[in-house]
Image (cartoon, rainbow, N blue to C red):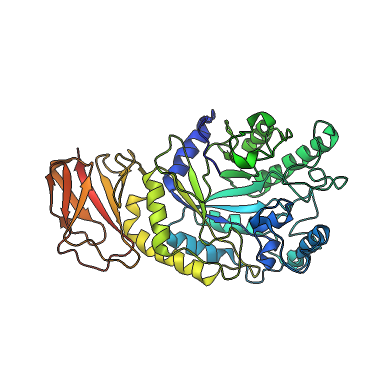
């Protein structure tokens, strides 16, 4: 999705404090999970009647849209994640160095992974197979498990709801992702949907313990005046879909003071940070931001998905942090309630690197020149060590060796008392400046350094 440039900082001073704290966390876990995992489809999107490659229907019911919808909604009756154990996820995420998590309490299909009293389309309803489990309210179980280990908690919530008859009114067939009637012509239906949305968000904000982030998706549900016609996916928005977010945010913050609200892609005071999706900005952005990205190719579980290597994931984290952002890394649990074993392996490898090198990640900010070739820079935030301490992170090729001899870096000025130390080996490295170029000798570095070499540079000019 396109970047949002007209950022408006929140007025609430406590929100600003929490936002600064969140920016220091750097690394979070995202999870897309629901009954759709049984079909290995792209979460809710096969319900959307748009002719996009990634929304295509598959399987025996694919030939008829309405048969497909009925079959999709019957997934509620067979979804029984017998291996569900959020503590296993917490342990893996904590080892990897993640500090916050965001979970899909409800995606666009409208299925609630929490005990909503506004609908029977929930995991706790008697029609749901998993309702017989004492842990059927998986949102509560997940939030509590992560909160107990010090994670900040984020509730993903879809503003559109394709199951709700006040959003997709059965009188008309749905044509695309948007509301299928004119809210101005049928205000009673739209007001009913607004109340439904307000009440569901209040349930999440009131009944699920401390929540730090309300992460709102479905940016086409927005006031018509905020639509940006230069953004391709917004061109189809022709109706005013204003759900009165100021009212929702005010209510949410009475239950959760200082709540960070992320109304994705809707520029204004309720997009407290921006969320470039599946991309890394090429330079630092002048406002808080977070890249949300999949570990595999899909947001939701797909059998046999191809996962990025630990080397790729560590490099993504370093690049994002060097540009002032956070990485929200998504893993989709399967229908049995567990992750693919490969996901655990990736987090374990990331954790081994972070155990040694996390000082270059947490509590840091960007520093010019931000990068030099394959070297990326971060600087301790003022509340950390001296602000003249920076880190230079050299990204290694997959299974690649250190560069032979010396490392050349442009754009850094060092004082005569500066010293450079490898975080991995704790060796102090000789250096020199020649015609403005920093030369760092790597001769004699020992150890099997993987993924990225981190150099701590003290007393930078």
Hey, which quadrant is residue 261 in on the image? top right
Hey, which quadrant is residue 143 in on the image? bottom right
Given residues 87 and 311, the one toward you in this image is 311
Q: Quadrant of the C terminus?
A: top left
| Total marks in image | 0
Residue 239 visible at all: yes
Q: Residue at x 43, y 59 (%)?
A: 313
Q: Quadrant of the N terminus?
A: top right
Percent of width and height locating residue 230: 58, 35
Q: On the picture, is 126 further left or further right than 4?
A: right
Given residues 353 and 82, the one toward you in this image is 353
The answer to whether 105 is drawn above or below residue 308 in the figure is above
Q: On the picture, is 423 further left or further right than 20?
A: left
Residue 363 visible at all: no
Toward the right, the furthest residue is 171
The answer to whether 334 is drawn above or below residue 406 in the figure is below
Q: Residue at x 60, y 43 (%)?
A: 214
Percent of width and height locating residue 215: 60, 45
Q: Residue at x 52, y 67 (%)?
A: 306
Percent of width and height locating residue 330: 54, 57
The answer to whether 326 is drawn above or below residue 333 in the figure is above
Percent of width and height locating residue 173: 83, 48
Given residues 196 and 383, the one toward you in this image is 196
């Amino acid at each position: 999705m396109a970047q949002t440039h007209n950022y408006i900082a929140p007025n609430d001073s406590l929100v600003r404090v929490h936002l600064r704290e969140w920016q220091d966390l750097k690394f979070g876990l995202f999870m897309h999970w629901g009954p759709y995992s049984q079909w290995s489809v792209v979460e809710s999107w096969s319900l959307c009647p748009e002719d996009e490659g990634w929304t295509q229907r598959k399987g025996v019911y694919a030939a008829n849209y309405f048969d497909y919808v009925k079959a999709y909604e019957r997934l509620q009756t067979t979804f029984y994640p017998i291996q569900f154990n959020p503590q296993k996820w917490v342990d893996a995420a904590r080892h990897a160095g993640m500090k916050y998590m965001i979970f899909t309490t409800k995606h666009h299909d409208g299925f609630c992974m929490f005990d909503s009293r506004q609908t029977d389309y929930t995991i706790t309803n008697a029609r749901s197979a998993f309702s017989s489990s004492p842990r059927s309210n998986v949102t509560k179980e997940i939030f509590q498990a992560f909160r107990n280990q010090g994670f900040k908690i984020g509730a993903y919530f879809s503003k559109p709801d394709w199951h709700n008859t006040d959003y997709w009114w059965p009188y008309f067939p749905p044509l695309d992702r948007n509301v299928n009637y004119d809210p101005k012509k049928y205000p009673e239906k739209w007001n009913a949907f607004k109340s439904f949305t307000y009440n569901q968000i209040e349930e999440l904000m009131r009944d699920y313990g401390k929540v730090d982030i309300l992460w709102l998706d479905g940016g086409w549900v927005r006031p018509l005046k905020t639509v940006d016609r230069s953004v391709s996916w917004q061109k189809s928005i022709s109706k005013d879909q204003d759900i009165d977010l100021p009212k929702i945010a005010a209510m949410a913050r009475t239950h959760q003071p200082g709540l960070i609200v992320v109304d994705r892609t809707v520029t204004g005071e309720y997009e407290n940070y921006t969320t470039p999706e599946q991309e890394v900005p090429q330079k630092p952005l002048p406002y808080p931001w977070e890249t949300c990205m999949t570990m595999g190719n899909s947001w939701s579980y797909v059998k046999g998905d191809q996962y990025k290597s630990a080397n790729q994931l560590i490099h993504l984290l370093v690049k994002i942090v060097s540009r002032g952002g956070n990485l929200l890394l998504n893993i989709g649990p399967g229908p049995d309630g567990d992750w693919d074993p490969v996901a655990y392996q990736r987090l374990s490898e990331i954790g081994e690197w972070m155990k040694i090198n996390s000082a270059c990640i947490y509590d840091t900010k960007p520093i010019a020149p931000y990068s030099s070739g394959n070297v990326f820079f971060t600087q301790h935030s003022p509340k950390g060590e001296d602000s003249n301490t920076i880190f230079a992170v050299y990204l290694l090729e997959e299974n690649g060796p250190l560069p032979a001899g010396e490392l050349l870096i442009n754009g850094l000025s060092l004082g005569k008392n500066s010293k450079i130390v490898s975080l991995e080996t704790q060796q102090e490295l000789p250096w020199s400046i020649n015609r403005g170029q920093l030369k760092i000798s790597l001769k004699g570095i020992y150890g099997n350094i993987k993924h990225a070499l981190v150099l701590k540079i003290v007393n930078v000019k």
